Amino acid sequence: MRVGLQIPSFTFPGGPGQIGPAFGRMARDADQAGLHSLWVMDHFFQIGVVGPPEEPMLESYSALAYAAALTERITLGTMVTGVTYRHPGILIKTVTTLDVLSGGRAWLGIGAAWNEEESRGLGVRFPPVAERFERLEETLRIAHQMWKGDESAFEGDHYTLERPLNSPPALRSPHPPILIGGGGEKKTLRFVARYADACNLFDGEELPRKLDVLREHCEREGRDYAEIEKTSLGRFTGPPSVDEVVDTIGRLAERGVDHAIFTQATGQDLAGTLGEALTQIEKLVPAGR
């Protein structure tokens, strides 16, 4: 089981001048605790489940580049980029740059987008849902083409790239893993089976059924279900104990999750607890637990 940390809030004591030091410390702590992944949301306004839109929110890829310079092993990604506000060619170039500068530690986390409020606030067109999924599929096709080094013109219904050059190439082989966020059963999970290396689902009662749907899509697409990394996103209502984290990771593993990602609530210091839980799990596994 891999374990990751998502940092969704940048509201720290001391105001904006403390955002850099605090976020940097969290990234280093997660890296040193042995966590596999570090994630930030690709939003421009804070989202409602975390806080009001006026709360501080960092641009995600700048934040990940900063974290890359302060860490050595932990992988880095967005949870997740909305397809409507990142042009595909530029997005793949951005993720490739992060991969090169981090020594091969980047993810492409992507989804169909949902936050109309921030799009309208910043003057970004927010298409209807059907078009957003069309754009998502074209972006996934462009990602595969650019990471293969194929510079031939791409002609889609929404995007035209005359020469999708991507130099330098990504360091990760065959490419930075593509994670699609969302549990939509007709399109999102079908796109996972067709194009992605990982899915991300919310930790909840529906998780086992969503994985069953993904397995069915894999069968129809001729894809090996085992090839896809199953990740989950969850949170603790308060500061968890190490035993609580161990039990949660065990429950997720039994449900078929390969990579458990936990959201750090404001004021929590979650990286250390997750690291201790990993150490405890490593001691328990040889005993057959």
Image (cartoon, grey):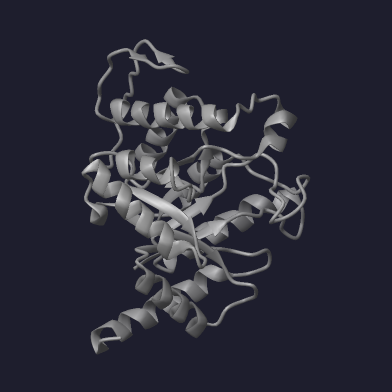
Residue lying farthest to the top in this orientation: 162
From the viewer's perspective, is 239 left or right of 259?
right
Asked if 3 appears above or below 121 in the picture, the reply is: below
Q: Residue at x 57, y 33 (%)?
A: 129
Asked if residue 21 lies left or right of residue 150, the reply is right
Q: Splitting the image into 4 quarters, where does residue 23 fall?
A: bottom right
Q: From the viewer's side, name the closer residue of 191 and 58.
A: 191
> In the rendered image, which quarter contains the C terminus?
bottom left
Residue 195, percent from left and from top: 32, 38
Q: Quadrant of residue 256?
A: bottom left
Q: Nearer the viewer, residue 17 or 58?
A: 58
User: Looking at the image, can residue 51 be seen?
Assistant: yes
Q: How many marks?
A: 0
The residue that appears at 78% across and 45% down in the rendered structure is: 54
Q: Toward the viewer: 165 or 167? A: 165
Q: Which residue is outermost to the bottom?
A: 287
Q: Is 158 placed above or below 198 here?
A: above
Across and down, in percent, residue 14 comes to 76, 57
Which residue is pictured at 40% across the width and 46% down the height? Answer: 189
Residue 258: x and y in percent read 34, 63
User: Is residue 230 something one can see in this rendering?
Assistant: no
The answer to whether residue 3 is left or right of residue 79 is: left
Q: Residue 233 at what x, y percent from top left?
A: 50, 60
Of the 4 image quadrants, the one containing the N terminus is: bottom left
* Towards the viewer: 54 or 119: 119
